């Protein structure tokens, strides 16, 4: 399960990609990530005992470079009963390229606390020059654009297969993101991904409804 923030407006529901940049620009990214954590805790408390679902949520790289915020993440998540090994912090590959060294201590601290880490937006640049083997990620997520191309293109499929294979060689599990149709899902299966997510597999739901 991936937890994503939505903003409700008079015109409807706005996806995070449409407002996250503005949130960062105006210095509110810590407040947004803190809000996600605070909303997540009561939801996790309602999770049925023994439910082994993996719950993933995004944290900005800007907050991972702040030692106090990293400590706050761990302390807050310890206020709920779900084992930390079932919780996964997702990190943007694009943002991480700009602050990899600064964010590395924070990511290692989260991993040491027992949290899983996922790299979102893995691509060929990370495969060969991103230093993936030095980073404490458990899960690698491949973006939709590469997957859609692979559905109808043998060269694209070979590229995605190679990226999936590299992740597996490094001991990471793999997720195909934003799978929107059966053709893309076929490419995901052919490439050997461990997991897939997207509208083709299930529409977004309010977290409380999903956990109930």
Image (spheres, helix red, strand yellow):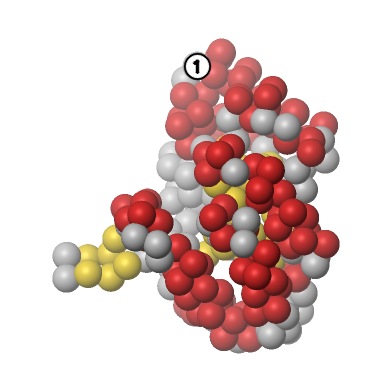
The number of discs equals 1
Give x and y (percent) for residue 98: 56, 39
Quick check: 192 above or below 66? Answer: above
- Residue 148 in view (yes/no): yes
Farthest left residue?
10
Residue 171 image position (x, y, % from top left): 82, 40
| x 40%, y 66%: residue | 28
Q: Position of residue 159 (x, y in %)?
A: 61, 20
Residue 9 vertical placement versus 174 (above, below): below
Residue positioned 73% across, 35% down in the render = 132
Task: Name the residue beneath numbered marker 1.
Answer: 153
Res. 43 image quadrant: bottom right
The vertical placement of 10 against 136, above or below, is below
Side of 29 where 109 appears, left or right: right
Q: Quadrant of the C terminus?
A: bottom right
In this rendering, would 212 be left or right of 50?
A: left
Which residue appears farthest toward the top when viewing the image?
155
- At horizontal 74% and vertical 62% (from top left) the residue drawn is 110
Secondary structure of the residue carrying numbered label 1: loop
Is 3 in front, or is 182?
3
Q: Which residue is found at the position 73% from the left and 32% from the top? A: 131
């Amino acid at each position: 399960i991936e937890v994503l923030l939505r903003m409700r407006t008079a015109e409807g529901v706005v996806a995070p990609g449409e407002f996250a940049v503005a949130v960062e620009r105006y210095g509110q990214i810590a407040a947004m990530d803190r809000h996600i954590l605070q909303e997540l805790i009561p939801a996790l408390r309602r999770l049925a005992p023994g439910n082994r679902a993996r719950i993933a949520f995004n944290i900005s790289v800007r907050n991972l470079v702040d030692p106090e915020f990293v400590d706050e993440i761990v302390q807050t998540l310890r206020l709920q009963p779900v084992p930390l090994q079932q919780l996964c912090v997702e990190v943007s590959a694009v943002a991480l390229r700009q602050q990899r060294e600064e964010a590395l201590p924070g990511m290692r601290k989260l991993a040491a606390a027992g949290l899983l880490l996922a790299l979102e937006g893995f691509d060929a640049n990370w495969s060969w020059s991103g230093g993936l083997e030095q980073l404490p990620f458990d899960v690698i997520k491949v973006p939709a654009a590469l997957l859609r191309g692979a559905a109808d293109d043998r060269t694209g499929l070979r590229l995605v297969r190679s990226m999936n294979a590299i992740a597996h060689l490094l001991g990471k599990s793999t997720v195909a993101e934003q799978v929107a149709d059966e053709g893309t899902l076929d490419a995901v299966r052919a490439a050997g991904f461990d997991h897939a997510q997207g509208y083709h597999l299930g529409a977004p739901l309010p977290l409380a409804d999903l956990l109930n």
